[in-house]
Amino acid sequence: MKFRVLAAVAAVSLASYATAVVAQSDVVKQREAQMKEWGQATRPVGAMLQGKAPFELAPVQAALDIYVKNAATLPALFPEGSQAGSDSLPAVWEKNAEFKERFATFAAEAKAARAAITDEASFKANFPAVVRSCGGCHDTFRAKS
């Protein structure tokens, strides 16, 4: 009887551990997918900013909308203990309030830029600050590859 109880406890513990590992892996994949979405949205806009592509308002607005959307959901995708398998530095969890605040600031800057950008001149005046805000987070919270 004791063996059956111990075997059952071991099985439940193993299942819980496996679920936690899979959930952690899924959360890393989810946040990486959202970050990649940001990168894909930024590429054509970056080309415009560098003068390598003509200015088009629609892709700029779309990128800013994606920034706002993902900035709202990404902080929840960094639960305690989900560093394994990612480029996240321990600072994400050590300075978690600052980390989350950076997402809120980034979203606010993207929203403001979305409202302000109506043409190429306003794009060149407003978009660089959004890019700096995004990159500033990388300096503190992401390992260099």
Image (cartoon, grey):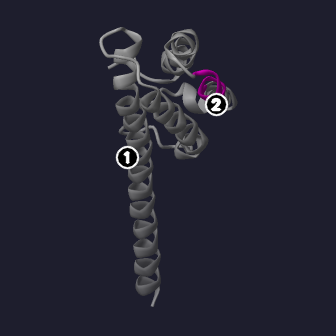
Whether residue 132 is visible? yes
State which region is magenta: 110-117
Q: Which residue corresponds to the image point at 51% horizontal and 32% vertical from the top-left?
A: 61
Q: Nearer the viewer, residue 109 or 101?
A: 109
Quadrant of the snapshot with the C terminus = top left
Q: Which residue corresponds to the image point at 57% horizontal and 22% vertical from the top-left?
A: 118
Q: Which residue is mark 1?
A: 29
> As drawn, is 41 to the left or to the right of 65?
left
Q: CA distance from mark 2 to mark 1?
A: 26 Å
Residue 39 lies, with reference to residue 28, above or below; the image says above
User: For numbered disc 2, what is the local secondary structure?
Assistant: helix
Asked if residue 116 is among those painted magenta in the image, a careful observer would answer: yes
Whether residue 86 is visible? no
Q: Which residue is mark 2?
A: 111
Q: Which residue corresponds to the image point at 42% horizontal and 72% vertical from the top-left?
A: 10
Kind of residue at badge 2? Lys
Q: Which mark is residue 143?
A: none
User: For numbered disc 1, what is the local secondary structure?
Assistant: helix
Kind of residue at badge 1? Lys
Q: Which residue corresponds to the image point at 34% horizontal and 16% vertical from the top-left?
A: 54
